């Protein structure tokens, strides 16, 4: 496990690139094979995913932000799903053992959360103007005091995003690894298989949920920042 925010490590960097590459390749294949006739399985999946996120984001975001934000949300969700599940696959790791999910290293969720924080502030400046964005930071809900309140609120946001994702994915991987160290023999093998399979299914579900939570919270925060009423 890696709790460092500054120390560079190759494994999470490489697995992060793998996650991005998988989403990019699937998207390109779906786009190249797109047809007006009977769609392929990949095309059907992508069309359904796009429509789902367009509806989801459309209910949360201002109309001027929704089209671009829906594509960002879909891309972020798919990348996080691949990244979260990658550590659940019994692939050879770097130096032995299984490969860990990039999101099980604190630096990756922290970096993603920091990037989303910057995008959220950009949305506020773009759709409110610099003056409106500064006014929202300093003057609401109370003059001057609002700066302290808003600063705490905005800074807690990326921290909570990062640690929620990191903690859940890391915990799932650790418990899954523990199931491989149970007693040997027929009983141990059966117990390991049964518990390991159940936990694997549970971890996949948690991976999907955490990817969705990270994405929805990002959309919600960005929508609030871009809203003229905020």
Image (cartoon, rainbow, N blue to C red):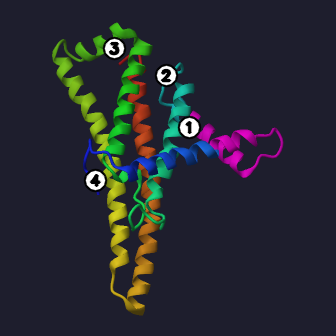
Asked if residue 155 lies left or right of residue 222, the reply is left
Please say if 193 is above or below 215: below
Image quadrant in which you'd find residue 130: top left
Residue at the front extreme, as displayed: 95
* Label 4 vs label 1, nearer the camera: 4
Q: Residue at the spot x=54%, y=39% of the render?
A: 74
Secondary structure of the residue carrying tag 2 is loop
Disc 2 from disc 4: Cα separation = 38 Å
Q: Is residue 32 magenta?
A: yes
Q: CA distance from mark 3 to mark 4?
A: 36 Å
Residue at label 1? 53
Mark 3 and mark 1 lie on one chain; the one further toward the N terminus is: 1
Query: Are the residues at dot 2 and dot 4 in contact (C-beta closer than 8 Å)?
Result: no
Q: Residues within 10 Å of mark 3 (few under 14, many from 20)?
A: many
Q: Is residue 170 magenta?
A: no
Q: Which of labels 2 and 4 is toward the front?
A: 4
Q: What kind of secondary structure does the magenta stretch mostly adopt?
A: helix
Find numbered disc 3 in the image and state the secondary structure of the residue it sits on.
helix
Q: Is residue 145 left or right of residue 37?
A: left
The Cα atoms of the two marked residues, 3 and 1, are separated by 27 Å
| Outermost right residue | 37
Q: Give the residues drawn in magenta, as a range.
A: 27-54
Please tell me whether mark 3 or mark 4 is closer to you in this view: 4
The residue indicated by pointer 3 is 133
Residue 175 at what x, y percent from top left?
33, 68
Structural distance between the alpha carbons of marks 3 and 2: 16 Å
Look at 66% across and 47% down and name the residue there. Answer: 45
Residue designated by label 4? 2
């Amino acid at each position: 496990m890696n709790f460092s925010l500054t120390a560079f490590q190759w494994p999470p960097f490489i697995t992060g690139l793998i996650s991005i590459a998988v989403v990019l390749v699937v998207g390109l294949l779906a786009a190249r094979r797109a047809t007006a006739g009977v769609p392929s399985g990949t095309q059907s999946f992508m069309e359904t995913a796009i429509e789902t996120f367009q509806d989801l984001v459309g209910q949360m975001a201002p109309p001027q932000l929704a089209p671009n934000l829906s594509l960002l949300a879909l891309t972020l969700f798919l990348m996080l799903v691949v990244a979260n599940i990658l550590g659940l696959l019994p692939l050879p790791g770097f130096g032995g053992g299984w490969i860990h999910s990039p999101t099980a290293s604190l630096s990756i969720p922290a970096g993603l959360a920091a990037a989303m924080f910057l995008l959220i502030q950009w949305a506020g400046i773009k759709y409110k103007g610099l003056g409106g964005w500064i006014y929202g930071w300093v003057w609401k809900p109370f003059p001057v005091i609002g700066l302290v309140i808003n600063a705490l609120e905005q800074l807690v946001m990326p921290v909570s995003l990062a640690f929620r994702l990191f903690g859940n994915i890391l915990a799932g991987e650790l418990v899954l690894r523990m199931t491989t160290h149970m007693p040997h023999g027929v009983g141990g093998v059966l117990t390991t298989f049964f518990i390991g399979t159940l936990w694997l299914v549970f971890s996949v579900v948690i991976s999907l949920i955490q990817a969705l939570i990270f994405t929805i919270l990002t959309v919600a925060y960005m929508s609030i920042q871009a809203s003229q009423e905020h």
